[in-house]
Image (spheres, rainbow, N blue to C red):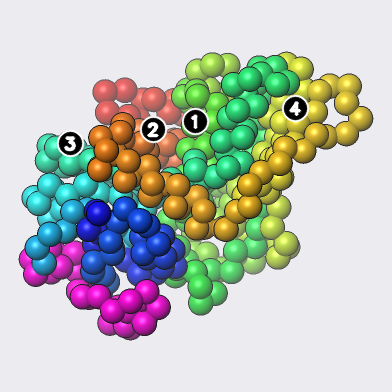
Amino acid sequence: MLRVLLAGLGVRGRHWAQVIRGSERAELVAYADPRPQALAGAAAEFGDRPGFASVEAALDALDGIDALVLANPPIEREPILRAACARRLPILVEKPLALNLGEAVKLVRIAAEGAVSLMVGLNFRYLDVTRALIGLLEEETVGRAEFARFTYERWRDGRRADLNKYPLTMAQPMLWEQSIHHFDLLRYVYGQEPIRVQCQTWNPSWSMYKHESNVAALFEFDGGLRVNYQGAWQGNWAAPAFEWRTDCSEGIITQRSQFGRLFYARRADAQLTSLPLPPHERWISETRALFAAFLDHVLDGAPLQCSGRDHLRSLAMVEACIQSSASKETVAVGDLLPGG
């Protein structure tokens, strides 16, 4: 059994508490959160366990912690990572690792110098629909992918009680909090790395967010793929919209929900063919699969997935979008990574 300290008890942290508590290979042994009410709420919902105001306090007080799951906001994480690395604890951290590429590079370096595994919680990689989409591409069911359009639009009410509040004032909240998932999926699903991007970000007049909440970008990848991306946290209709369409040499693949609804069609087909997918518990099923991959690595020595170092490539896409929007120029994504 892996004895886990869970830090951060917001919306995502409560998902993690449910998943860790339900695992047959891990034990949730303590909570860390600076808010007394969050600690009390977690104890009531997930079981009475020691609660601490910080990770450092928990590690100083407890023996036998085997791993850290870090679900706090991506701000000032360096002291936490240093404390975990000092005790050689493997770390599973919620995305994004940091809110700028330079800070993320530093955190990856700290983990490497401490010989500590650092996994980033990119749960969308573990959706059944993601795996099915990869299968269609690998089997070339409708040929080879050549271009794509990824559209994610919603009116995200950041004032809702069940959502974290820090995105309301953070810079580029759509890119750092939401698009990072989508950019990582583009790299992961297509198996290609971005070369360059043209991007614009903006905030509509009705936005409740202090900074740019909408994004439009055109990416070019090293395998020749081009992707048009539009992400909006402040579309002006409460009904969310999602479509990820890939045009291939013999037809198309289209995903029409963030959590499912996958179809394909050959060029002359009169209608789409639907792919059946297993039942899915939103935010839990894919998090459970992500955590299983972490356990396989820590307990069984399986290769580390979603490594911090790999995550830097997706963060570079975010950073490149910000630079492109500011400069009104095309930005080379690879130039932003250490070593170019």
Q: 277 above or below 253? A: below
Could you tell me residue 332's position as x and y percent? 44, 25
Q: Are marks 2 and 1 in contact (CB under 8 Å)?
A: yes
- What's the distance in space between the residues labelled 4 and 3, CA to CA? 41 Å
Mark 1 highlights which residue?
Answer: 187
Helix, strand or loop under label 2: helix
Mark 2 highlights which residue?
Answer: 313
Residue at point 57%, 58% (across, down): 281
Magenta span has 47?
yes
Q: Is residue 179 visible?
A: yes
Q: Is residue 308 visible?
A: no
Could you tell me residue 237's position as x and y percent? 73, 62
Residue at point 18%, 41% (across, down): 116
The part of the chain drawn in magenta is 36-61
Residue nearest the viewer, comparing 257 with 317: 257
Name the kind of residue labelled 2 in the image: Arg
Name the kind of residue labelled 4 in the image: Ile
Q: 220 above or below 89? A: above
Q: Residue 223's image quarter?
A: top right
